[in-house]
Image (cartoon, helix red, strand yellow):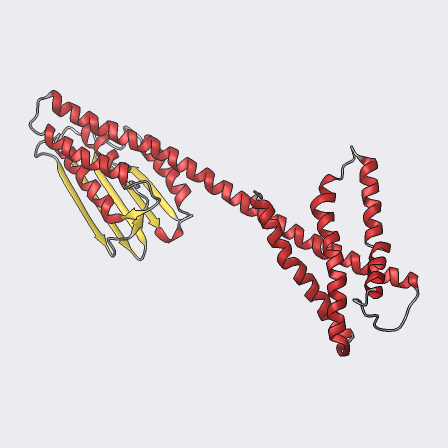
């Protein structure tokens, strides 16, 4: 079974050889417009020889040349000097003998004929060599791009593998506290957790998901968190979306919501609150999460936990135009996320 690279290389020569033939036909047609049928047969005869010679040179001989094998490399170079000069002349002579090649123009000496054919063959080497170099350069860039994409995808999967368990463990801790207190709300919290688990297991494997599905999970998570608090907790979640089917990487927004409860509300002694606003207009996403904290702005700096750090890295891998700002105010923490959804990397 042939390697994919060999198949691609074969495809290159499938169009490269006809291109070389057509280029020479155009040149000869200008010089001898009245003998075009004969020119076609002549060029096919010559181009066939040079195509095989160049294929052998670039795909088999040049890769084997090295200083360690100087003697064999030297004789290989001499062989191709013969192939592209005297050998090419003998090939033309064979065509004339077999009445395949038609002599056109005025007769010239053998020395001049060999010189003209050598120049022709050198031109073919330059043509095949330049195109082959461009082809290798393009393939190298494509391979590098594919490696970069694969590396980024692996890193994204790693970040998700960190974020998702982190999110679930925090949620399980909440349920554990309810169960320890023998709260009647424990069964309802387990039910909501099962919805979140089902979503994570079966809906988040793809790169994108409809934003309305992420909204449902945010709603379930908020409801799950509210079970832990009394009526003193105020939660306001509002959104303004042009298209509920707008695609978004799954679970991209949840770290900011989780951060508001785990590192904000849970540390607030009086009047805890969470305000969440989401809007998407003209593919511009704005997500603002504001929550109460237990410290004034002068006592602590805005710290980045694993959720926020992973979110920043995911944004860096996913988008080229985004902004994530966090600000610690007086007993208030605000996270603002802006994404140009059309700037997907």
User: Residue 300, image x and y in percent?
Assistant: 29, 29
Q: Is residue 45 above or below residue 332?
A: below
Residue sitting at the far bottom: 34
User: Residue 9, image x and y in percent?
Assistant: 62, 50
Residue sitting at the far top: 180
User: Residue 189, image x and y in percent?
Assistant: 14, 31
**What residue sits 71% from the left and 48% below the top?**
58
Q: Is residue 341 above or below residue 92?
A: above
Answer yes or no: is residue 324 visible. Answer: yes
Left or right of 10, for residue 323:
left
Residue sitting at the far front: 98
**What residue sits 23% from the left and 48% below the top?**
212
How many numbered tags mark residues here?
A: 0
**What residue sits 81% from the left and 68% below the top?**
99
| Occupied quadrant, residue 104 | bottom right
| Occupied quadrant, residue 203 | top left
Answer yes or no: is residue 332 visible. Answer: no
Q: Identify the image quadrant of the N terminus.
A: top right
Front residue of 131/18: it is: 18
User: Residue 276, image x and y in percent?
Assistant: 21, 43
């Amino acid at each position: 079974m042939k390697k994919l690279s060999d198949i691609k290389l074969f495809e290159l020569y499938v169009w490269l050889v006809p291109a070389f033939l057509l280029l020479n036909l155009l040149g000869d047609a200008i010089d001898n417009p009245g003998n075009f049928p004969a020119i076609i047969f002549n060029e096919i005869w010559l181009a066939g020889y040079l195509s095989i010679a160049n294929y052998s040179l670039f795909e088999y001989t040049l890769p084997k040349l090295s200083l360690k094998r100087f003697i064999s490399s030297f004789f290989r170079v001499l062989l191709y000097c013969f192939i592209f000069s005297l050998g090419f002349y003998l090939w033309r002579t064979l065509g004339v003998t077999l009445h395949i090649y038609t002599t056109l123009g005025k007769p010239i000496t053998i020395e001049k004929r060999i010189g003209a054919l050598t120049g022709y063959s050198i031109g073919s080497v330059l043509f095949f060599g330049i195109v082959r170099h461009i082809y290798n350069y393009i393939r190298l860039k494509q391979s590098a791009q594919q490696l970069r994409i694969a590396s980024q995808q692996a890193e994204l999967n790693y970040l998700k593998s960190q974020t998702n368990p982190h999110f679930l463990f925090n949620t399980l801790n909440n349920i554990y506290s309810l169960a320890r207190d023998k709260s009647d709300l424990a069964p309802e919290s387990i039910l909501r957790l099962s919805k979140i688990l089902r979503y994570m297991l079966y809906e988040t494997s793809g790169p994108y998901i409809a934003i309305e599905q992420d909204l449902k999970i945010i709603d379930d998570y908020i409801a799950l968190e509210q079970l832990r608090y009394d009526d003193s907790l105020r939660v306001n979640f509002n959104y303004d979306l042009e298209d509920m089917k707008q695609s978004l990487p799954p679970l991209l927004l949840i770290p900011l919501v989780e951060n508001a409860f785990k590192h904000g509300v849970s540390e607030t002694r009086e009047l805890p609150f969470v305000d969440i606003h989401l809007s998407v207009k003209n593919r511009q996403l704005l997500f603002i999460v504001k929550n109460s904290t237990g410290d004034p702005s002068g006592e602590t700096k805005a710290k980045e936990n694993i959720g926020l750090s992973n979110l920043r890295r995911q944004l860096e891998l996913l988008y080229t135009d985004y902004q994530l700002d966090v600000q610690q105010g007086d007993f208030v923490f605000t996270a603002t996320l802006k994404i140009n959804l059309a700037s997907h990397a």
